[in-house]
Amino acid sequence: MSNVRQISVFIDNKPNQLAGVMRMMKESRINARALTVADTKDFGILRMIVNDTDKAVEKLKAASFAVAVTEIVAISIPDSPGQLSRVLDILGSRNVNIEYLYTFLGKSDKSVSFVIRVDDNENASEALTDGGIIQLTENDIAEM
């Protein structure tokens, strides 16, 4: 199984909060490779995959941020119509529930990469492997 660790950081929904986190990442020489922000009225959840997860978690916790690490599945598929639908059909055929997904830049302009948070990483990974879908490792993403 090639699960990837994703960092979730809870930040106040106020000006400069995200900038502050990213500034700290820059100063620590941590590179965000995939990133999304979801918000509510009072706070945001910054989800990211970085080139050094352990160091990022250490720095964020030292700065008093609430941080969680979650294992997700990351894939790379051809950048053509119907490919994401194919992946979703593969996961659906194994009753894998998708909690959320987001895309990020990959190694090639001929493919697209996705982070997928599912309810059963092992089942999802097996289904994707059986379906011929390329799964990415943390090292793959760090080197992008």
Image (cartoon, rainbow, N blue to C red):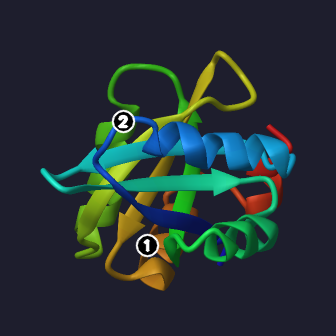
Q: Is residue 141 above or below residue 110?
A: below
Q: Is residue 130 above or below residue 88?
A: below
What residue type is disc 2 on?
A: Pro
Where's residue 43, x and y in %?
26, 57
Q: Which mark is residue 69?
A: none
- Secondary structure at badge 2 equals loop
Q: Residues within 10 Å of mark 1 (few under 14, many from 20)?
A: many
Q: Which mark is residue 124?
A: 1
What residue type is disc 1 on?
A: Ala
**Mark 1, mark 2: which one is toward the viewer?**
2
Q: Residues within 10 Å of mark 2 (few under 14, many from 20)?
A: few
**Is residue 79 or residue 132 the one in the foreground?**
79
Q: Is residue 53 left or right of residue 78?
A: right
Where's residue 102, x and y in %?
40, 43
Residue drawn at (28%, 73%), measured in percent from left and top?
A: 96
Residue drawn at (86%, 43%), measured in percent from left and top?
A: 143
Q: Is residue 99 above or below residue 86?
A: below
Q: Is residue 129 left or right of residue 85?
A: right
Q: CA distance from mark 1 to mark 2?
A: 38 Å
Q: Considering only order in the chain, which callout, 2 or 1, is on the residue closer to the N terminus?
A: 2
Instruction: Inspect this view and state whether residue 130 appears.
Output: no
Where's residue 126, x and y in %?
52, 75
Q: Which mark is residue 15?
A: 2
Residue drawn at (65%, 78%), measured in percent from left and top?
A: 1
- Secondary structure at badge 1 equals helix
Residue drawn at (30%, 52%), measured in percent from left and top?
A: 88
Instruction: Inspect this view and state whether residue 7 appears.
Output: yes
**Is residue 140 or residue 35 the one in the foreground?**
35
Where's residue 76, x and y in %?
59, 42
Q: Is residue 33 above or below residue 8?
A: above
